[in-house]
Image: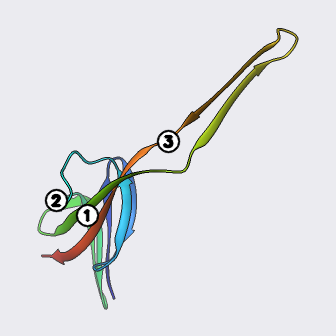
Amino acid sequence: MVYAVVDIGGNQMMIEPGKFYDVSYISANPGDIVNLNRVLFFAESNEFKIGVPCLKDIIIRTKVLKHIKSKKLTVFKMKPKKNIRLKQGHRQTLTRVLVEGIFS
């Protein structure tokens, strides 16, 4: 089993080749190839590599599938005894990427 822990947009994710993931918005068009080079950990069968802080020789090749929005979060603020109630929603913009391969 081949997998890696990578830093994408300030979030650390464990990824595997052939699967797709929703990450923070990447300014690339659908169909573009994006190389991820901030690899923190790499594992292949019984071989492990740990970066301090990153591994320089491993590149993860991903393909941008589409841009989506996450589920809506409701933000509700209330101040008691002041009759102030604010309700608004928020949807984070995400990018869905397909991991094509992990190359060393």
Amino acid of disc 3: Arg
* Gap in angstroms between the C-alphas marked 2 and 3: 24 Å
CA neighbours of label 1 inside 10 A, class few (<14), some (14 to 19), many (20+):
few
The residue most toward the right is: 81
Amino acid of disc 2: Val
Sequence-wise, the earlier of marks 2 and 3 is 2
Sequence-wise, the earlier of marks 1 and 3 is 1
Location of mark 2 (residue) = 34
Residue 96: give x, y in percent of width and height. 33, 60
CA neighbours of label 2 inside 10 A, class few (<14), some (14 to 19), many (20+):
some
The reply to whether dot 2 and dot 3 touch (C-beta < 8 Å) is no
Location of mark 3 (residue) = 91
Location of mark 1 (residue) = 51
Q: Considering depth in this image, is 69 or 50 the residue closer to the camera?
A: 69
Asked which quadrant contains residue 98, the reply is bottom left
Amino acid of disc 1: Gly
